[in-house]
Image (spheres, grey):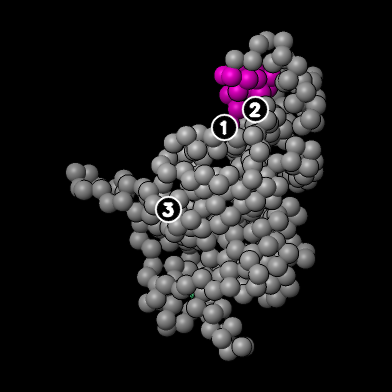
């Protein structure tokens, strides 16, 4: 099935507070009022530190975690509740590739068996299955000789190729790539980037890429969204974002990347850790760490401000500076 677009509006995902015994458990929002659009053949890149809610958001899109508020519209049809018929259509057209390839493959299965698993589940008969696994191995650059080996007997890059082959086995149009390069060395990373670009082109795939790797985002993203403490604080076409990052958190992320060509200004070192979503700060959630915090930031949550076409930022300072400039 074709992937045309995915729209997310005001999405909220809550968890129950698991601390305390015999105390009424409070719900808290891990994802709050999120909105974005993904069009066919884009690479939509979600940037942010660990703990910002990126993976929770991806799981909710796929129906692996329920969402409590807002809506998801897939190919023009609204998912009215988690796991309804439209959600199942989305899920059957999507696959996910995870961060740690060795952990996402069964250690007792050969790579062949792991790649074949979705085909077995679909009832594909043995000969057709064997042909398809070999075809997938060739498409992902995995040597046929390695198919009989277990994950512990091959490299991280080869395991990730097997994961990508498994993800492609059902011919999805939409891939969620959750930190796909994090566990790999630099050479394996570059080879995987080449592979991801090649298969995207060949199979007309749409990517939802979750990463904290700015260099990877710059290389392959078409649209960037920056997530902090469960909300999106900046969204922009990738060239605009890398030419003119506006939100203080986005600037800090770029300045910390320490890769040439990503950041020209002085290094911005953030103090402290990302706060717990169970006790989010008042006003702007980033204010305890923001080097440009103003009095209003502690009291009033900032609204979204458009700084260019498709370039939106949630920050009092950006809105104030734009007001002064106009
Ligand atoms: Fe910093 Fe204030 Fe902007 Fe938040 S709203 S990012 S605290 S300047």
Q: Which residue is mark 2?
A: 170
Q: Earlier in the sequence, mark 3 or mark 2?
A: 3
Q: Distance from label 3 to label 2 (Cα)?
A: 29 Å
Q: Is residue 98 visible?
A: yes
Give residue 203's position: percent from left, percent from top. 75, 37
Q: Which residues are magenta?
A: 103-122
* Spatial separation of the CA atoms under disc 3 and disc 1: 22 Å
Q: Nearer the viewer, residue 133 or 205?
A: 205
Give the label on residue 282, or none: none
Q: Which mark is residue 92?
A: 1
Q: Is residue 288 visible?
A: no
Query: Looking at the image, is mark 2 or mark 1 earlier in the sequence?
Result: 1
Q: Nearer the viewer, residue 201 or 27?
A: 201
Determine the residue positioned at 72% across, 20% down: 133
Q: Position of residue 95 (x, y in %)?
A: 60, 35
Q: Are marks 2 and 1 in contact (CB under 8 Å)?
A: yes
Q: Secondary structure at mark 1?
A: helix
Q: Residues within 10 Å of mark 3 (few under 14, many from 20)?
A: some
* Image quadrant where residue 225 sits: bottom right
User: What residue do we see at 37% from left, 70% from top?
Assistant: 282
Q: Quadrant of residue 174?
A: top right
Question: Which numbered disc, 3 or 1, marks the residue that appears first in the sequence?
Answer: 3
Q: Residue at x 69, y 50 (%)?
A: 42
Q: Secondary structure at mark 2?
A: loop
Q: Where does the image place residue 198, in percent across and percent down from the top left?
A: 80, 41
Mark 3 and mark 1 in contact? Answer it, CB < 8 Å. Answer: no
Q: Is residue 82 left or right of residue 157?
A: left
Tell me the SS state at disc 3.
strand
Q: In the rendered image, which quarter contains the N terminus? A: top right
Check residue 233 for magenta coloring.
Answer: no
Location of residue 58 with respect to 130 vertically, above or below = below
């Amino acid at each position: 099935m074709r992937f045309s677009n995915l729209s997310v509006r005001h999405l909220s995902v809550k968890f129950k507070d698991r601390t305390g015994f015999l105390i009424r458990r409070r719900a808290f929002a891990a994802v709050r009022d999120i909105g974005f659009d993904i069009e066919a053949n884009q690479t939509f890149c979600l940037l942010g530190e660990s703990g910002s809610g990126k993976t929770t958001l991806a799981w909710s899109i796929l129906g692996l975690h329920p969402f409590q508020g807002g809506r998801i519209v897939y190919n023009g049809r609204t998912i009215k509740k988690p796991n309804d018929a439209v959600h199942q259509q989305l899920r059957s057209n999507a696959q996910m590739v995870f961060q740690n390839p060795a952990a996402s493959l069964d250690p007792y299965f050969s790579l062949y068996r792991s790649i074949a698993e979705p085909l077995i589940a679909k009832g594909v008969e043995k000969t057709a299955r064997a042909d398809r696994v070999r075809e997938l191995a060739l498409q992902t650059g995995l040597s046929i000789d390695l198919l009989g080996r277990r994950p512990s007997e091959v490299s991280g890059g080869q395991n990730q190729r097997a994961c990508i082959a498994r993800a492609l086995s059902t011919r999805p149009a939409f891939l969620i790539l959750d930190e796909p390069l994090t566990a790999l060395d630099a050479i394996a990373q570059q080879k995987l980037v080449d592979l991801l670009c090649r298969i995207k082109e060949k199979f007309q795939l749409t990517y939802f890429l979750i990463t904290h790797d700015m260099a990877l985002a710059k290389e392959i993203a078409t649209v960037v969204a920056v997530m902090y403490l469960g909300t999106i604080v900046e969204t922009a076409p990738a060239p605009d974002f890398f030419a003119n990052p506006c939100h203080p958190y986005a600037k800090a992320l770029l300045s910390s990347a320490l890769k040439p060509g990503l950041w020209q200004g002085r290094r911005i070192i953030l103090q402290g850790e990302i706060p717990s979503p169970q006790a989010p700060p008042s006003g702007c959630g980033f204010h305890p760490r923001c080097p440009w915090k103003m009095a209003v930031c502690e009291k009033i949550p900032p609204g979204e401000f458009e700084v260019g076409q498709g370039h939106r930022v949630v920050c009092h300072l950006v809105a104030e500076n734009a007001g002064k400039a106009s």
